Amino acid sequence: MATTKGAKTKFRNRVIIYFVTFILSVVYLIVGNRIATDGQEIFPSDYEGSVRARVEVINDVREANYALEGMEPMTGYTIYFEARILQGSQKNEVVYSMQTIDPYYYPQPKQVTVGDRILIFPDSDMDENADWIMLEYVRTDALVWLGVIFAVLLLLFGRIKGFNTLVSLAFTCLAVFSVFIPAVLAGQNVYVWAIVTCVYIIIMTLLIVYGVNRKSIASGIGCIAGVATAGLITLIMDRIIHLTGMLNEESLYLSMYNAKIDLKAVIFAAVIIGAIGAVMDVSMSISSSLTEISIVSRDPTPRKLIRSGLAIGRDIMGTMANTLVLAYIGSSISVVLLLVAHNRSLLELMNREMIVVDVLQALVGSFGILLTIPLTSLVCAILFRRSQKAREQAKAAREGWLDTEAR
């Protein structure tokens, strides 16, 4: 009876914590967005630019010869078609549109066909036969369906944990895209917003998915320590290797957009936000494993738990370091290929700031994981040892009460 009552109390507390975390997350996103944007809309709701449309009829396909100085003429195409607008004040209206295929543009885009969903924008000055110009194919529809399939599979396999994972993932994306990024674009302190965003993601994720218990507390402490280590090493290395933050053309355009944006701080944010997922994964894996060991073991001493945590961490580290390195290489593989193709000196290539930052991200993330492993193991040993003592005291008190009743 007591066990059932205790289980109901734990469940009630878990639900209360869940909803409090949910409400506080919504408040953080709303208030954080207002502070970050300072009243300015990143994507104005009254923007009247490109709209979604569906190709209804292909009216004409015209060939045109293009010639650049010193090059042979090449054939391009202009496709005239009718498109039905699918959104906005002109919804269901059929308009005359065009697609221009430049032969010097590689790779060549696919010519539109009937039924294609595209983005078009108004421009009556470019061609007298069309008032709208094709901008891009609508690609988000396929991504939405892929996301729906992922969510369904996650719910089928994870059930309530899968649902909580989706909720935490949604809050994570909103924290980055509706709070952190607007703050950076507004020229606010990137260091502060990066740290706040990381702490929020860690606490919110653990509370939503796992609730408040020794496992999540140990994981949270280990994760925050690992991310803090990554940030500290980044700041130290920034001074040593003389980073400027000017990695590529995108960095230049970002500084031109707002001169207040600290490009070196953007690198700091990229390092710690990029490392947070791997560090959280490691800390929770160790915390979860040591939780089970403390339950099934007859004598889970701190030394045994720490040794077990280090052994588990060594196995995790072997693959997690590869995960970080390959993730950073994969995210910039096109740039790496281009740099390798146009640099004859390995020394020059490895000292380019873009390459240096990618290597720095991988190394710093690995350092964060290395510290997370022993610290999470130590915290687990302390917390679970106290838990064991509490269970022993409760057991002794219960046995003493039974002996008294028997007498």
Image: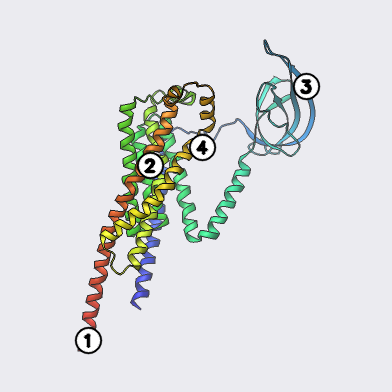
Please rate how many residues cluster around mark 2, counting C-alpha atoms within 10 Å: few if below 14, some from 14 to 19, many from 20. Answer: many
Distance between the Cα atoms at labels 4 and 1? 69 Å
Asked which secondary structure carries label 1, the reply is helix
**Can the viewer see residue 272?**
yes
**Can the viewer see residue 38?**
no
N-term mark: 2 or 3 = 3
Asked which secondary structure carries label 4, the reply is helix
Please rate how many residues cluster around mark 4, counting C-alpha atoms within 10 Å: few if below 14, some from 14 to 19, many from 20. Answer: few
The residue to which callout 1 is attached is: 405
Residue type at tag 3: Glu
Residue type at tag 2: Ser
Residue found at x 30% / y 59%? 305
Nearer to us in this view, 303 or 127: 303
Q: Kindly check if marks 4 and 3 are in contact, taking CB atoms under 8 A apart as contact.
A: no
Question: Is 116 located above or below residue 122 in the figure?
Answer: below
The residue to which callout 4 is attached is: 330
Residue found at x 33% / y 36%? 192
Q: Residue 309: x percent and y percent?
A: 33, 55
The residue to which callout 3 is attached is: 63
Asked which secondary structure carries label 2, the reply is helix
